[in-house]
Structure formats: structure tokens, C-alpha cells
């Protein structure tokens, strides 16, 4: 198992890609701390399981990471607006 600890703001995402396997894959996500609109997450997964922040995955997929950050900001703004 490998581990990763990172922080994400509200509406930011973590992408976990599970490679095809004949064995079940267990991924554990632990909230280590939460403060305001931000959470500190711990992720444990098999070493061959890629885990990326959304903007990094977008870049790996050939998408514009700046555009993805803009999308995140828009999601955050929509969330702040009164309904």
C-alpha cells in the first residue's frame, strides 16, 4: 500500500483510477482534519493505483489545467451563491 495526504477546498476533486485486476481493490480515504471549506484527506491505495488531483489528471488527459482550475472556481462560486 502507498499513501498520500493532501488538502482540497470545497468542490475540488481527487481522481482515483483503479487498474483492471482479478482481485478486489481497497482504497481507504480518511478525513484527517476539516477547517472552514477545506479538508485534509489521507488516501491509502495499492501502489499501482494512480491518484491525482483533478487538475493534474486533466493535464495527463491532454486537457488544459488552467481551464480545469477555472471550472473549479466556477463550482465554488455557484456553491457560495444563495439559492
Image (cartoon, rainbow, N blue to C red):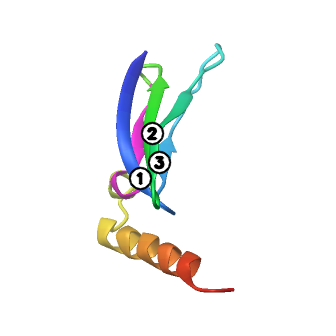
Residue found at the very far right of the displayed protein: 83
Q: Residues within 10 Å of mark 1 (few under 14, many from 20)?
A: some
- 22 or 34: nearer the eye? 34
* Secondary-structure class at tag 1: strand
Residue 83 lies, in percent from the top left, at 69, 86
Do the numbered discs 1 and 2 sit on residues whose CB atoms are within 8 Å? Answer: yes
* Secondary-structure class at tag 3: strand
- 54 or 28: nearer the eye? 28
Say which residue appears at 30% left-offset and 71% top-offset.
66
Q: CA distance from mark 3 to mark 2?
A: 9 Å
Q: Which residue is mark 1?
A: 8
Residue 53 magenta:
yes
Which segment did they paint magenta? 49-56
- Mark 1 vs mark 3, foreground winner is 3
Q: Which residue is mark 2?
A: 41
If you read the primary sequence from the N terminus, does the residue marked by circle 3 or circle 2 appear first? 3
Q: Which residue is mark 3?
A: 34
Q: CA distance from mark 1 to mark 3?
A: 10 Å
Residue 31 lies, in percent from the top left, at 51, 37
Do the numbered discs 3 and 2 sit on residues whose CB atoms are within 8 Å? Answer: no
Residue 33 lies, in percent from the top left, at 44, 41
Say which residue appears at 32% left-offset and 65% top-offset.
65
Image quadrant where residue 27 sits: top right
* Secondary-structure class at tag 2: strand
Amino acid at each position: 500500500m502507498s499513501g498520500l495526504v493532501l488538502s482540497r477546498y470545497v468542490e475540488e476533486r481527487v481522481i482515483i483510477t483503479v487498474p483492471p485486476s482479478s482481485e478486489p481493490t481497497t482504497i481507504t480515504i480518511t478525513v484527517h482534519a476539516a477547517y472552514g471549506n477545506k479538508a485534509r484527506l489521507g488516501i491509502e491505495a495499492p501502489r499501482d493505483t494512480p491518484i491525482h488531483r483533478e487538475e493534474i489528471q486533466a493535464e495527463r488527459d491532454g486537457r488544459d489545467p488552467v481551464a480545469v482550475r477555472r471550472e473549479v472556481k466556477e463550482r465554488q462560486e455557484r456553491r457560495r451563491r444563495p439559492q
